[in-house]
Amino acid sequence: MLKLTSIKVGYIVSYDYEYLLTSINTLYDYVDKIVLAIDINRQTWSGNKFEIPQSFFDSIKEFDKRNIIEIYFEDFYVPSLSPMECETRERNLLLKKLGRKGWKLQLDVDEYIYDFKTVKKFLLRNWFFNVFPKLTPMQFRGKLITLFKEIQDGFLYIDNNERFSFITNGIQNETARLDSKTPSFYTDIVVVHQSWARKKEEIVQKISNWGHRDDFDTAAYYDFWDKLNQSNYLDYVNIHPMRPELWNKLYLLNCNGINEFITNYAVLHPQKITQFDSRFLYDKVKKKLFKK
């Protein structure tokens, strides 16, 4: 069968490496290549040290039966850059490592795409954007389901159509995973993000090292998060640390662990990806090819 395009995935791996295999498990059978970007000096974007045990690399090697996973070591921390600038730089280096042609998914280790078979069908149906990607640059956005806190009976989460860019046929981002100069389309692809649903010590490590470290009062926000529980979560609205209205409400899904959450949520909300109208691109391509 003629292969019209490839599907490749790039992960940024750092102190939260333990979440990676949960994410890879959701898509491994349907992609052509996976690249794991790891700082060669084990430094975060803030310059702090972290460790990844040898057992992690052994697990990846044992898991990779198809031999499609590549580990990309590089010096991703630049002291003269802000954490967000370091993040953007690393994501761009990772995109280039994935290659010029094909669809490239930019994922964090705690982002999970269920029913990836449906996602693959959608991407292969749009193979033609990768024939001459410089002429037809494209980004696809998905819907984030943000897990905010794990409590005794399950997970508190946000489900309000928050969108983010994470699939591209390009090799350059402007900020983080976004390039404002590249056409972007919403796809309905649902991505479960285990963002804040972590142990207390992991949350402290996260807010001390991620790209948004300097964007809000992390100590005060941690205190709010720490006090949140099953009895009071309905009392809080508009809880996003930088754009409050973005996370307007918390929901509770009863489950036992992350795998059961993904399974239960997928049953309630199956992937339903809609095709978009790409006709406007033809005029853009014509202008590029026949401009005076």
Image: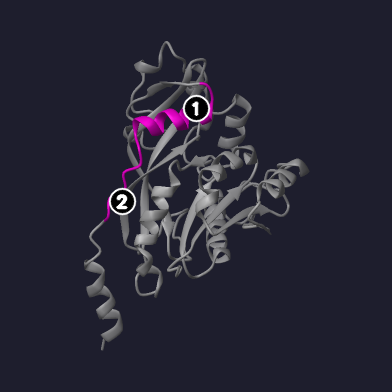
- In the foreground, 57 or 51: 57
Kindly identify which residue carries mark 2. Answer: 186
**How many numbered badges does the structure rendering display?**
2
Question: Is residue 261 covered in magenta?
Answer: yes
Q: What SS does tag 1 mark? A: helix
Is residue 47 toward the left or the right of residue 187 in the image? right
| Residue type highlighted by circle 2 | Tyr
**Residue 133 in the image: above or below residue 60:** below
**Residue 205 in the image: above or below residue 131:** above
Q: Disc 1 vs disc 2: Cβ atoms closer than 8 Å?
A: no
- In the foreground, 244 or 36: 36
Is residue 276 toward the left or the right of residue 31 in the image? left
**Residue 255 in the image: above or below residue 3:** above
Q: List x then y, in percent, for residue 235.
A: 35, 16
Q: What SS does tag 2 mark? A: strand
**Residue at the image point whose x is 39% and y is 60% from the top:** 124
**Residue at the image point whose x is 37% and y is 24% from the top:** 250
**Residue 91 in the image: above or below residue 209:** below
Q: List x then y, in percent, for residue 22.
A: 57, 39
| Residue type highlighted by circle 1 | Glu
Residue 131 visible? The answer is: yes
- In the foreground, 3 or 50: 3
Kindly identify which residue carries mark 1. Answer: 260
Residue 53 visible? The answer is: no
**Residue at the image point whose x is 65% and y is 51% from the top:** 64
Q: Which region is colored magenta?
A: 256-275
